[in-house]
Amino acid sequence: MKICIDTHTHSVSSGHAYSTVDDLARGARKRGLKGFVLSDHGPAMPGGPPPYHFSNLRIIPKKLFGLMFFTGVETNIMDDAGGLDLAPVYCKRLDFVMAGFHEICFASHGQTVNTQALLAVLANPLVDAVSHPGNPLFPIDIEEVVKATAKYGKALEINNSSFRIRPGCEENCRRVAQLSRQYGSLLSCGSDAHYWRDVGNFTAAKALLEETGVPPELVINSSLERFKEFVKKRRAARAEVPVKKL
Ligand SMILES: [Zn+2]
Ligand SMILES: [Zn+2]
């Protein structure tokens, strides 16, 4: 399986990442990718960017060092109702909107509440994908979450960094992949790079996708065309959401 776009990268704007946008682009080029998504953390992350960071991303060219540049965010899930830390008016301007649990913003409330929060997130038309749903610190009912992901045409992420920094994630990630295959639900594959050398590093995530027999058709970033198609569809869905102007 080829992964052509990195859907999950962080720049210095995230507050605890160490590379510039240009560094990330050069890293992506070195790996032979066709593009990448800049998905800095939402504003509730200590040291994270202010909301205006996300609307100003339009000043960055669509092509960097010959690669496609996609605007994005990894919003923080803030409560058990799936509330996010970035206002809809900002989310609407982006190519790719992820939402994920981070302990610093929302501590795990146990499987029932965590699952309820994710189901609300998946029903939110502004959200495209859930980052690192295999995180063992946030137990969820994986089957329920995969079913909702399939229903709404969203994606669950197989996060390459999880295998290194979230001990015990393998079993959950395997189940996410297996059930996604079973229900025909979409997946994304992201490096979650916080330093340029990690951009496009999908070694462990790709091995898991191959081991579980997930076909490339289910992985939104397995080709540039597939990813562009997904972004187009999701941007159109996001455009329907009524928001207050800034
Ligand atoms: Zn994250
Ligand atoms: Zn991240």
Image (cartoon, rainbow, N blue to C red):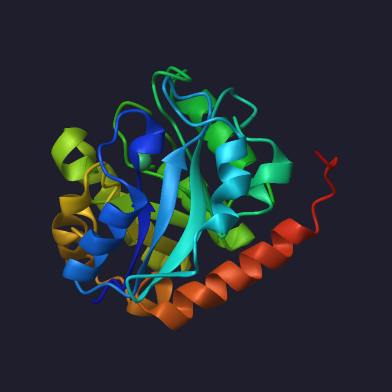
Tell me the quarter of the image containing the N terminus.
bottom left
Q: What residue is drawn where x is 80% and y is 38%? A: 246
Q: Where does the image place residue 109, in percent across and percent down from the top left?
A: 47, 18
Q: What residue is drawn where x is 26% and y is 53%? A: 23
From the viewer's perspective, tell me whether residue 77 is left or right of residue 180. Answer: right
From the viewer's perspective, tell me whether residue 246 is left or right of residue 175. Answer: right
Vertically, is 44 above or below 60?
A: above
Q: Where does the image place residue 70, in percent across and percent down from the top left?
A: 48, 62
Q: Nearer the viewer, residue 94 or 121?
A: 94
Residue 223 lies in what quarter of the image?
A: bottom left
Q: Nearer the viewer, residue 50 or 102?
A: 50
Q: Nearer the viewer, residue 67 or 198?
A: 67
Vertically, is 246 above or below 176?
A: above
Residue 80 lies in what quarter of the image?
A: top right
Q: Is residue 139 visible?
A: no
Q: Where does the image place residue 88, in percent across and percent down from the top left?
A: 71, 42
* Count of marks, rendered view: 0
Residue 65 lies in what quarter of the image?
A: bottom left
Q: What residue is drawn where x is 21% and y is 74%? A: 32
From the viewer's perspective, tell me whether residue 203 is left or right of residue 41. Answer: left
